[in-house]
């Protein structure tokens, strides 16, 4: 049989990613929602910090999903999906797609294994928190 082995973050690792993102958010006085997805975009773990807006969770999920779907940072699509951009319109094909910063792919050893997304601060702040969390746990 032609089967493909898949790797994904364990629940324990996903919870450590949430904790690391939360710790970074706290140093910046931010209240975020954070989400970890597997390589198929399915939620492994998520949390909304006290005082984070209710809508932040849906955006955090969307950012994690988008990052793993395309294997790149969600902020990379911000300009190209604007009217007249090279990717104009594709982000309207799936309501889960979010095309501003705050979602990153989780890559280890060159393999895409999941995604991490956050929402609740400015897009650049969301991205800084997920990057710090992923790097602190050894992701590329």
Image (cartoon, rainbow, N blue to C red):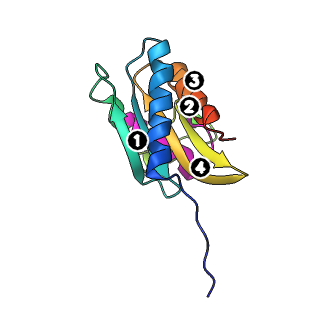
Q: Left or right: 138 with respect to 16?
A: right
Query: Within 10 Å of the Cα at label 1, are there few (<14), some (14-19), or many (20+) other Cα atoms?
Result: many
Of residues 102 and 14, the one drawn nearer to the viewer in this rendering: 14
Mark 4 or 1, closer to the camera: 1
Query: Within 10 Å of the Cα at label 3, are there few (<14), some (14-19), or many (20+) other Cα atoms?
Result: some
Q: Earlier in the sequence, mark 1 or mark 3?
A: 1
The secondary structure that most of the magenta stretch takes on is: helix
Q: Left or right: 74 with respect to 117?
A: right
Q: Which residue is mark 1?
A: 61
Q: Which residues are magenta?
A: 59-75
Q: CA distance from mark 4 to mark 3?
A: 19 Å
Q: Which mark is residue 70?
A: 4
Mark 4 or 2, closer to the camera: 2
Picture quadrant where residue 1 is located: bottom right
Q: CA distance from mark 4 to mark 2?
A: 20 Å
Of residues 71 and 24, the one drawn nearer to the viewer in this rendering: 24
């Amino acid at each position: 049989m032609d089967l493909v082995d898949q790797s994904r973050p364990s629940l324990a690792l996903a919870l450590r990613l949430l904790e690391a993102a939360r710790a970074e958010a706290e140093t910046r006085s931010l209240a975020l929602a954070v989400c970890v997805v597997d390589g198929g975009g399915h939620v492994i773990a998520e949390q909304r910090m006290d005082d984070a807006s209710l809508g932040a969770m849906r955006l955090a999920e969307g950012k994690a999903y988008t990052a793993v779907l395309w294997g790149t940072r969600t902020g990379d699509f911000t300009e190209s999906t604007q009217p007249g951009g090279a990717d104009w319109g594709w982000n309207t094909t799936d309501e889960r797609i979010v095309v501003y910063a705050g979602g990153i792919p989780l890559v280890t050893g060159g393999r895409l294994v999941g995604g991490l997304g956050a929402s609740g601060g400015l897009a650049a702040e969301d991205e800084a928190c997920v990057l710090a969390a992923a790097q602190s746990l050894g992701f590329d």
